[in-house]
Image (cartoon, rainbow, N blue to C red):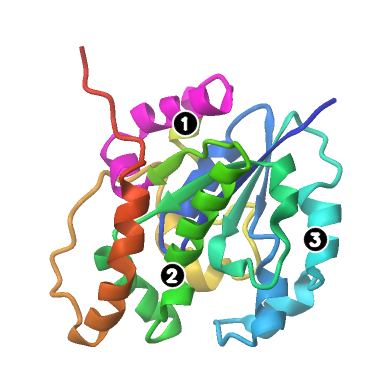
Amino acid sequence: MQTQRICLWSGPRNVSTALMYAFAQRRDTRVIDEPLYGYYLHATGASHPGSAEVIAAMRTNSEQVIREVILGPCEKPVLFMKQMAHHLVDIELGFMRETVNVLLIRDPGEMLPSLEKIIGKPTLADTGLKKQAELLKFLKALGQSPPVLDSRELLRDAESVLRQLCERLGLPFERAMLSWPRGPHPDDGVWARHWYGNVHQSTGFVPYRPKTEPFPPALRDILAECVPYYETLRAEALTPEEPL
């Protein structure tokens, strides 16, 4: 059986876990949560909540992760891997010739305040946006046409955007993707208690609501760095189809 290997290259706080839960509801799909996270923390020494626990629980050799997990055996026709773009530190990207790649972005004006609450003042590298823009260029050079999802558009009309995504991936859309059980999920990484509080309260995609809190002045410089990369990616994002 040939397995279709989908890598979702996201940034943090981008509803990527909700999208992983959506794919976990499919009958044909196995999901994996951030297989390169342990490697990233080990390689960079980044100070994230529960870092030692994550490193202890995961493979920390990137080549092994790629060989045994990303490209390893899978008992289902589809393998969906939630990935963080910023985990791609000193990693040769040739394996992406064997994966179907999707990019998930979020307006940095909404993402940065959320990220700051978890890791303190973030850097451009922490957001993954520059890496995502580089990935888009790299994947196009490989002859791929990676779908780009914007979390705002996904939350505006999850069914429409997921239908378009499934079509781009050559998969049938399943309505089961629109809901999941409340609470922790068996596919969660060990870091879930630090990062997944909101999604654990959900049973489906929560409709988009603009942020009302003032943007933190301390994050304005990093916001200015992020915006050009976000705009480049957003120009290619799927948008909900208008009803006929």
For residue 173: magenta? Answer: yes
Q: Residue drawn at (51%, 51%), measured in percent from left and top? A: 137
Q: Quadrant of residue 153?
A: top left
Between 80 and 232, which is closer to the camera in this rendering?
A: 232
Q: SS at mark 1?
A: helix
Q: SS at mark 3?
A: helix
Q: CA distance from mark 3 to mark 1?
A: 26 Å
Estimate the x, y position of residue 76 in percent, counting from the top left. Answer: 77, 32
- The N terminus lies in quadrant: top right
For label 2, count other residues whose C-alpha is less than 10 Å away and answer few (under 14), some (14-19) or many (20+): many
Q: CA distance from mark 2 to mark 1?
A: 23 Å
- Which residue bears the numbered disc 2? 127
Left or right: residue 88 versus residue 124 is right
Q: Give the residue type that dot 2 points to.
A: Thr
Q: Is residue 182 visible?
A: no
Discs 2, 1 touching: Cβ within 8 Å: no
Estimate the x, y position of residue 85 in percent, counting from the top left. Answer: 55, 62
For label 3, count other residues whose C-alpha is less than 10 Å away and answer few (under 14), some (14-19) or many (20+): some
- The C terminus lies in quadrant: top left
- Which residue bears the numbered disc 3? 65
- Relative to 235, residue 53 above or below: below
* Residue numbers of the magenta segment: 150-176
Q: SS at mark 2?
A: helix
Mark 3 / mark 1, whichever is N-terminal: 3
